[in-house]
Image (spheres, helix red, strand yellow):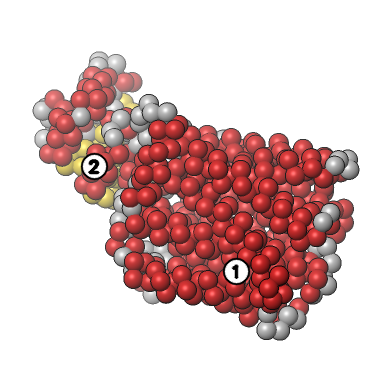
Amino acid sequence: MGERTEAVVGVLASAARNRSLRRVELSYGLFIGSEWAVWISLLVYAYEHGGTSASSLIAIVQLVPCMVLGPLIGAFADRHRAGRVLVLGYAVQGTTMAGMALAIAAGAPVWVVFVLAPVVNIGISVTRPAQAALVPSIVRTAEELTASNVLAGWVEQGSRLVVPAVAGVLLAVNGPALSIGVTAGMVVVAGVLVLSVPGSEAAPGDESVTTKLRANLGAAGRDRSTRLLLALTVLYQAFVGALDLLCVILALRVLHLGQGGAGYLNAAVAAGGVAAGVVTASLVGRPRLVRFLVGGILGATVALALVAADPTVALAFVLLAFVGLSGAVFEVTGQTLLQRVAPSDALAGIFSLRESLMDLGLVLGFLLVQAGVAVGGYQAALVAPALLAVVAVALLWRPLGAIDGAADVPQVEIQLLRHVRIFAVLPAPALEGVARQLVAVTAPAGAVVIREGDVGDGYYVIGDGVLTVHRDGVVVGRLQRGEGFGEVALVHGVPRTATVVAETECLLYELDKDPFVLLLTGHPVAAQEAQAITSRHRAPDPEAAAE
């Protein structure tokens, strides 16, 4: 096994051992499965009640409200803990899906389902932004951030492989009511899994939702790399929207696979995504991801265009699998790059804007299929996304090349600092400045990190592991991820007042004395927090002492 392969495997294994990350990824897999199952089920339901036009209409009815409300949802999410927002999104989805399943089973008028559909999608639109904002706060290194997105991609593609196929079976057995009812249960389980993962504190500030919305939009508009990634998201989602409707058309009109055929074709796409695991795993630790981003979107769109050449069942399944493989590469690289370049205090807001643009892309994709079918049949609709992708990449190739250089925002360190009260009160620019000065340090189990009586030369934030605090030879406390230590000596100019020992292997982030003191000098609120913390640590009560 090569050195790089060993490093990649090590990072992936480390991410898999992160308990909070495991729960978030598992809940995300259930969410993705339910999203695809309910989406396919509603397209089939609408197609049965009005053909292609009805399928397009129910898609647009779902997506347009989210396009409008998405940025507002993001502004709300930026002002609350990402984990709590994620649970709220799952609750909305599960409740509304259950209501929709009951309405279909009871034979309610079609308009009832059309009214409930956008409410489901509003709940769905909360999930990805909250997930994207939550993950940097629970991973421990920048490499683990990429690894978490790779793992999310595997979970997503696996879910897409299994759930649409199951949805196809459920649709064939008892129609959309049964399929949507089962997905409601999946979302409820997803919400329960993330109840105990609140994430770091939200960005400080008392601005209103509308003020935060303007700030988020301004942050996205000012940064060229963010704008380009969002533009590519619209293009890719137009392709996804076209693919969703084309799978229904191919299954029912061209390949004659029956009601469950759309689910089986989507499962083929997901199978390709699962196979992409080898490719996406190789992305861990790579600083340059743009070429994979471009290759992903071009590979997916061109493979779909080739389906038009010979629409046999076997070839359609093979080509759609390659669509899934290429699409998975695009999704992992696109999310990772946006997490790297987006302003840290507007992560949820920018990902909510991305969610709105994704919905816009889906609507454009459906309209593209409608136009393609009207002009040249389903063959033209299959080829159109590839033509658009080639033209867009040709026009944007030069500015796209600059994104890798801009993707160096220390998101993991920023989100970690938000766990620490001294730093959580800082405005975003100052927080990023501190994050850039942190130095990662590994301490093996049993190592003495600071020793009582020594001169204080730095402050430490715990990225992973457990440490014990000793004073006069007595254990007086334990410290773990998201906590800091070492401020007493720096704030009061005294020797270290305790010894801190690594109980397990630990990942620490060290901030030198000079930038720490300068930080407190320039930010009175942070200085007040530090004074309050050190006063407690120097109190005679040993239970309050943790250096």
Q: Given the image, on which type of amino acid does mark 2 rest?
A: Val
Q: Position of residue 446 (x, y in %)?
A: 30, 44
Name the element at disc 1: helix
Mark 1 Cα-neighbour bin, 10 Å: few <14, some 14–19, many ≥20? many
Q: Residue at x 50, y 67 (%)?
A: 329
**Residue that extends furthest to the front in the rendered view of this protein:** 375
Mark 2 Cα-neighbour bin, 10 Å: few <14, some 14–19, many ≥20? many
Q: Which residue carries the number 1 mark?
A: 324
**Mark 1 against mark 2, which lies toward the viewer?**
1
Relative vertical location of residue 206 with respect to residue 333 in this rendering, above or below: above
Q: Position of residue 198 (x, y in %)?
A: 49, 35
Displayed quadrant of residue 90: top right
- Pick whichever, 29 or 381, lies toward us: 381
Is residue 170 in sight in this rendering?
A: no
Q: Residue at x 36, y 44 (%)?
A: 218
**Residue that extends furthest to the bottom in the rendered view of this protein:** 310
Query: Which labelled disc corresponds to residue 165?
Result: none
Relative vertical location of residue 189 with respect to residue 544 in this rendering, above or below: below
Q: Given the image, on which type of amino acid does mark 1 rest?
A: Gly
